[in-house]
Amino acid sequence: MSIMGIIIAAAVVGAVGLVIGVLLGVASEKFKVEVDEKEILVRNELPGNNCGGCGYPGCDGLAKAIAAGEAAVDACPVGGAPVGAKIAAIMGVEAGSAEKQVAFVKCKGTCDKTNMQYRYYGIDDCRKVSVVPGAGEKACAYGCMGYGTCVKACQFDAIHIVDGVAVVDKEKCVACGKCVAACPNRLIELVPYKAKHLVQCSSHDKGKDVKAKCENGCIGCTLCTKQCEVGAIHMENNLAVIDYSLCTNCGKCAAKCPAKVIQ
């Protein structure tokens, strides 16, 4: 190849590169997506767990919602109040004073306290076991099956199966709600971190039937409701239920409970 041919080829390649560069520059300006500066700053403060506990598709989704004023500045359950305060400063608003919450398992039916119907051999997944006859080994259809679906759902190692029942580590729990959604028996709920008295049962059977299945079940005797001076505990379909917004943590209900199901 002659020198002139090489020069022409180089010139053509250079010209093509220049044209492509110009076109890419024009395209980037024409089709660029404007991003709110506050959205970037908010995203930088979020922890990046992408757990979905806030109700949005990951931290990017929450940052966009906060920047648009569609979500509270303290909506991240993982970051909690510290992150909420930083985001509030970015948004120029006051941080909320929402009380910290944690997951709580409403069951005390450990292996030594609940009766067994049969021995289950299969996949360790509560959702799959819930559709087999009897909904698992334990006689109580309302209780914790103990196959660990909630454990697998938790990204923070905050829940484990202990003696056949899921137990939450309050200090590790960030109230993302993944375990709540994973439990087929709806046994897990979010409660105030400071709550000292909680009903560890979900059975709606009558007292006699409860005792026939589990020694640790609520028998619906109503003694706890009669002890509460502020009306914070009442019965719903044979089960004691506590209103945490009214509870003063006096402990009288727990002291009077004959089944000892109020923690």
Image (cartoon, rainbow, N blue to C red):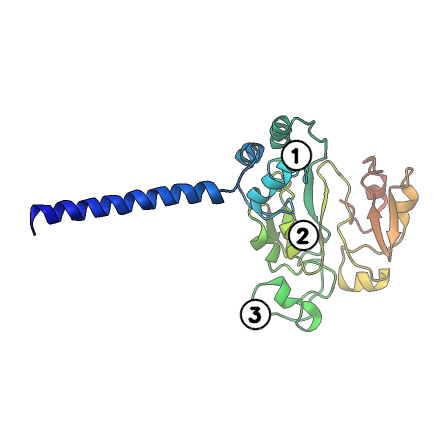
Question: Tag on residue 122?
Answer: 3
Q: Is residue 177 left or right of residue 58?
A: right
Q: Is residue 38 left or right of residue 241?
A: left
Label 3 crowd (10 A; few <14 / some 14-19 / many >=20): few
Q: Amino acid at mark 1?
A: Val
Q: Quarter of the image for the C terminus: give it.
A: top right
Q: Which residue is mark 2?
A: 180
The quarter holding residue 63 reads top right
Q: Which residue is mark 1?
A: 73
Q: How many marks?
A: 3
Measured along the vertical axis of the image, is residue 197 above or below residue 165? above
Res. 172 in view: no
Q: Nearer the viewer, residue 118 or 3?
A: 3
Q: CA distance from mark 2 to mark 1?
A: 23 Å
Please state which of the two labelled residues, at mark 2 or mark 1, is closer to the viewer. 1
- The x, y position of residue 131, in whole percent, is 67, 70
Q: Amino acid at mark 3?
A: Gly
Which residue is painted at 78% across and 46% down in the image?
A: 262
- The x, y position of residue 32, in whole percent, is 49, 42
